[in-house]
Image: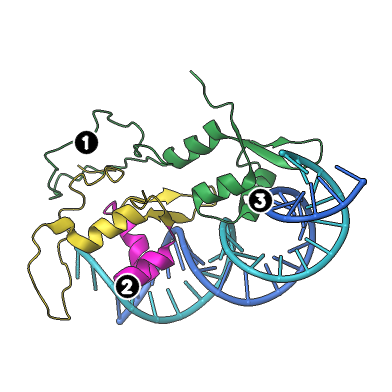
Chain colours: A green, B yellow, C blue, D cyan
DNA sequence: TGGGACTGGGGTAATTAGGGTC
DNA sequence: CATGTCCTAATTACCCCAGTCC
């Protein structure tokens, strides 16, 4: 499957994360995200990596204290247990 | 269709709920609200989820023209609205 | 070739995260 | 138990300019 050969521009990634394009550049400079440089020096990011970061936060942290009283919703939307939290963005 | 896939900053959510940004962070830390972390560690919230929490999704909501209508419903977070908000729930 | 729009780098202010306490 | 406020450290946002991409 296409893991995402699509390259996104800093502006695209910034819009996805709701941050400033400069911030995305800083992530690349910090090595937090893979970046492909163009001959001119501009950066390009892989959509697969960006999406992994967006959904990768799915910590699903469930400290099963047992005493919790969180009523489980009787309607699991997606069968995916720990699948993508988002059904699909634009 | 802007169901609200936009991401909001803690300050935005705090302003919407009229609470302190710190409180919003606690909600995210408690798992009561979905949160997306940026590579830098900052949190971003989905407007769809925030809006669902604000409107109450039309459940257990009565006509209360009183100015003070603080939803103390800390239980039913998301009833599977449009979907994106179904993170850790146990 | 010319142009518009975006990007990169540096620097500074604002916001956020985390812990501790009331 | 939940919320607001205190602190410090880290991250992010907006300013400038020049260069690059399409």
Q: In the drawing, what numbered circle is on residue A77?
A: 1
Disc 3 element:
helix
Label 2 element class:
loop
Residue B29 at least partly seen:
no
Residue at x-position 48% and y-position 56%: B42
Lateral position of residue A89 relative to residue B57, left or right:
right
Q: Position of residue C4 (x, y in %)?
A: 72, 55
Name the residue beneath numbered marker 3: A26
Q: Nearer the viewer, residue A73 or B47?
A: B47
Chain letter belonging to callout 3:
A
- What's the magenta region? B8-32
Q: Position of residue A38 (x, y in %)?
A: 76, 36
Q: Earlier in the sequence, mark 1 or mark 3?
A: 3
**Please, is residue D10 above or below residue A53 in the view?**
below
The residue carrying mark 2 is: B19
Q: Is residue B32 visible?
A: yes
Observer-side mark, 1 or 3, equals 1
């Amino acid at each position: 499957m296409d893991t995402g050969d699509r390259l996104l521009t800093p502006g695209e990634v910034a819009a996805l994360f709701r941050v400033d394009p400069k911030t995305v550049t800083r992530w690349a400079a910090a090595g937090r995200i893979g970046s492909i440089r163009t001959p001119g020096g501009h950066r390009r990011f892989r959509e697969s990596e960006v999406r992994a970061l967006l959904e990768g936060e799915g910590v699903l942290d469930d400290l099963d204290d047992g005493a919790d009283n969180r009523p489980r919703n009787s309607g699991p939307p997606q069968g995916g247990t720990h699948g993508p939290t988002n059904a699909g963005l634009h």
